[in-house]
């Protein structure tokens, strides 16, 4: 069976601990720790203190002290405790060395309790220590150049010139100085505002029917538009972006002829 000292040493080596680190962590002098690992009696202390060192060392390594204490048996004889005489004995004064040993035992017990509950990372037992928090550095602050100014708004394009001729109240002729024609008819929003419409574009009829209240319709042609309105007074016209107002007077059916050209 593996000796107690060898189990202590193998556990310390697995954890990568040096003897100086164990001495600092347990507050037990190095010579006592080496004696424990070598299964040797520790000169200068009694069996009770020596077993206390073993308990503290095992707890620091995260081992269960119980089995180690049960198997602990130094290879050589240990200094005997002074025999207890019967009867009244003179009171012995505690030496500074005894006070130091007592302080070491108290410190070892506190450390053993702390490591027992917190645990250490090792194979076969103990809770793993929490990993260190990962600190993410803030990204470097970069200064971007200001965005370029927006392009200036394009200059508004004037609508093409429109000339008008009214030979009689039921007929109006328009001449538009543009490459093609675009006519928008907008019916009023009154309850009685509706208009029968017929539209011929470049010699072909494209619409005949009634435009209801609030409706809008747009017609296009390359050369000519011929429009008849049954109730032109409820219809406003926009010809190639030129607002022309009502299409005709009240009570008169209106014929409108629109052509391109100078």
Image: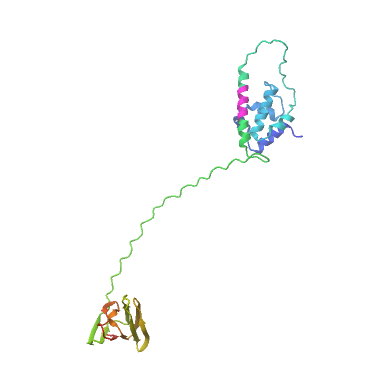
Magenta stretch secondary structure, dominant: helix
Task: Give coordinates of residue 86: x percent, y percent.
Answer: 73, 12
Q: Quadrant of residue 2?
A: top right
Q: Is residue 204 visible?
A: yes
Asked if the magenta segment contains residue 63, the reply would be: no
Q: Is residue 236 visible?
A: no
18, above or below 92, in the image = below
Q: Quadrant of residue 29?
A: top right
Total count of labels: 0
Applied colour scheme: rainbow
Task: Kindly give the residue lying farthest to the front in the view shown.
Answer: 191
Asked if the magenta segment contains residue 108, the reply would be: yes
Bounds of the magenta span?
Answer: 101-110
Task: Name the foreground residue: 225 vs 152.
Answer: 225
37, above or below 132, in the image = above
Q: Residue at x 67, y 29 (%)?
A: 55
Task: Give coordinates of residue 117: x percent, y percent.
Answer: 62, 35
Task: Kindly give the residue lying farthest to the right in the view shown.
Answer: 1
Task: Give coordinates of residue 204: x percent, y percent.
Answer: 37, 88
Task: Kindly give the residue lying farthest to the bottom in the view shown.
Answer: 203
Q: Residue at x 62, y 22 (%)?
A: 102
26, above or below 209, in the image = above
In the displayed structure, does residue 87 sit left or right of residue 177?
right
Task: Give coordinates of residue 87: x percent, y percent.
Answer: 71, 10
82, above or below 242, in the image = above
Q: Quadrant of residue 190?
A: bottom left
> Quadrant location of the N terminus?
top right
């Amino acid at each position: 069976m593996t000796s107690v000292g060898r189990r202590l040493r193998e556990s310390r080596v697995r954890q990568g601990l040096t003897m100086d680190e164990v001495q600092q962590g347990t507050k037990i002098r190095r010579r006592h720790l080496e004696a424990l690992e070598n299964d040797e009696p520790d000169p200068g202390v009694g069996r009770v203190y020596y077993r206390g060192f073993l308990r503290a060392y095992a707890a620091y390594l995260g081992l269960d002290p119980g089995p180690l204490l049960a198997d602990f048996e130094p290879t050589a004889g240990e200094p005997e405790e002074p025999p207890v005489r019967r009867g009244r004995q003179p009171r012995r004064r505690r030496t500074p060395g005894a006070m130091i040993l007592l302080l070491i035992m108290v410190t070892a017990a506190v450390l053993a309790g702390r490591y027992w509950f917190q645990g250490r990372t090792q194979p076969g037992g103990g809770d793993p220590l929490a990993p260190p928090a990962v600190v993410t550095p803030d990204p470097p602050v970069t200064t971007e150049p200001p965005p370029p100014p927006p392009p200036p708004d394009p200059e508004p394009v004037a609508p093409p010139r429109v000339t008008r001729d009214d030979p009689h109240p039921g007929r109006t002729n328009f001449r538009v100085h543009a490459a093609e024609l675009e006519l928008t008819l907008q019916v009023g929003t009154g309850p009685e505002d509706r208009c029968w419409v017929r539209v011929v574009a470049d010699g072909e009829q494209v619409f005949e029917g009634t435009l209801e209240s609030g409706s809008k319709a747009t017609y296009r042609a390359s050369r000519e538009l011929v429009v008849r309105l049954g109730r032109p007074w409820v219809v406003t016209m926009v010809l190639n972006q030129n607002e022309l107002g009502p299409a005709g007077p009240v009570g008169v059916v209106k014929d409108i002829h629109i052509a391109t050209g100078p």
